[in-house]
Amino acid sequence: MNIFLAQQNYHIGNFEANTARIIEAIHAAEARGADLVVFSELCVCGYPPRDFLEFEDFIARSYAALDEIKAHTQKTAVLVGAPQRNPHREGKDLFNAAFFLFEGEIKQVVQKTLLPTYDVFDEYRYFEPGFEWNVIEYKGKKLAVTICEDIWNLGDNPLYRICPMDRLILQKPDVMINLSASPFDYDHDESRREIIRENVKKYGLPMYYCNTVGSQTEIVFDGGSMVFNADGEIVAQLPFFEEGMEGVELDTLGKKKPDLETDILPNTVMTELVFDHNIERIRQAIVLSIRDYFKKMGFKQAILGSSGGIDSAVTLALAVEALGKENVRAILLPSPYSTDHSVDDAVALSKNLDNPYDIIRINDIYEKFLQTLEPHFKGLPFNVAEENMQSRIRGNLLMGLANKFGYILLNTSNKSELSTGYGTLYGDMAGGLSVLGDLYKMQVYALARHINREKEIIPANIIDKAPSAELRPNQKDSDSLPDYAILDRILYQYIERRQGPKEIVAQGFDAALVARTLKLVNTNEYKRNQFCPIIRVSSKAFGIGRRVPIVGKYLS
């Protein structure tokens, strides 16, 4: 049996395009001798569809798409993911399902058993867990089909009380097939590979694992679909961050006696933040996410504020790579406190990238604001009010240009700033998409050096100089924040690893610094709650995957 994996980039709710893409892959695989073509989880409607699943019209269109796809399965069988109506009165109205299509019919349906409801996942909100487990018999082979999370319950702290494969293995299957929508994060591809290997070792069966690729708002799917033989070896792997299709003959993959007592997979999440870990994959993820966000939303051009600092420089370089130099406009907005070298650095960057740029000085506007508010400020000394005013002027000018010419404003804030509230609402926190909001400051520096790996794109002075918001004379980030090399490590322990203050202090960090840092994080949730979507590249990004109260006393 020649089984093909079709790794594709879908568009949520775009049933016409998704269906056409699936049908095209069926015929391409059929021409290459495929007996079965496997697609990814919820590929028909796109993942994650979220509250679209509450619309009967959305479900009806998904079923109509299945009807269209199954007409193209006369010779070649297909496994596609789509929502399935629950025929029982009890429970949720839908299953997250894999449809086995052959000879123009729906021959069998497999329901997902383990429904993730954590981080960016919220599947139990919509779906009923599967409660029947049956192999699919096809061409003399028994196929054990599972969906994404169904293979992930092998950890040292199992999240669920059941493993679907424990039930399916009793029916003596010949192969495991998993339809997935597994998001990227810079610490995930290793654990994903090992969880598949552990399933192969435990059940003694080869596995075909099909993951989706592409970006859906803030979530990036990296592909990397794999075929494992029964010895736990990868015999085929599709590319990361690209579409692809590959077939492997099942009879070449072998079969072993199950070892249901195999060792439990240990937790593989990084215990320490490594600033340059998987930095190339991070670059690929962000570039793909920017490109897909604009393409799927129907946008063409971006605008951003270019300050001569590291964050705007990296954002600009990635946006140019994703959208093309002609489609990214940089606006330099110097204030009375902007240094000449910062302006020169920003100009040099745009010249290196060959993207359009403009210089709009805000001195006069800023002075007018000060004059207007002077009688109302009552002679109080210069403070954050005057600093933030400059940032908000910039935000207004950038949004004015964006509205006039149809640009999307890219936000340039990093995760260290967002964590500690080092940003101005309606100023430098404005934007339609946050490019670096899930990267700590030191990771941004690592990414800048990686961008410059072959030639200098980002001027060396931008990387070498001390970071500064330049909103008052001789300002440095270190005036308000701890050294980023230390701060980022504390933030990582608290946000990604959910360590409390005692655990963090026990790692050697100063107790007062830890208390201050955690308080900054918790008291600035109100700012992040108003922030734009953040491209997710870590295991715990701000946004839909991190839900903490705005009004809460804990550590604040």
Image: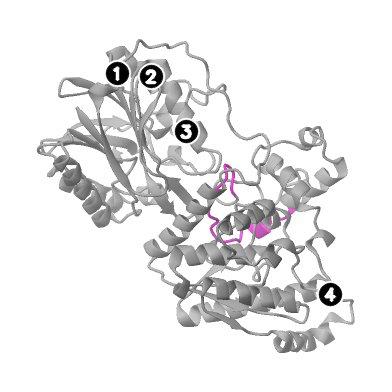
Distance, label 4 to label 3, CA atoms, is 49 Å
Label 4 vs 3, first from the N-terminus: 3
Q: Which is more foreground, mark 2 or mark 3?
A: 2
Distance, label 1 to label 3, CA atoms, is 22 Å
Q: Position of residue 294 (x, y in %)?
A: 42, 64
Q: Which is more foreground, mark 4 or mark 2?
A: 2
Answer yes or no: is residue 235 visible.
Answer: yes
* Magenta span contains residue 345: no
Mark identifier at residue 473: 4
409, above or below 235, in the image: below
Q: Which is more foreground, mark 4 or mark 1?
A: 1
Q: Position of residue 479 (x, y in %)?
A: 84, 61
State how the image is colored.
one colour
Q: Which residues are magenta?
A: 523-541
Residue at horizontal 42 percent and vertical 16 percent from the top: 202
Mark identifier at residue 231: 2
Answer yes or no: is residue 437 visible.
Answer: no
Mark identifier at residue 254: 1
- SS assignment for the magenta stretch, majority: loop
> Is 473 left or right of 251, judged from the image as shown?
right
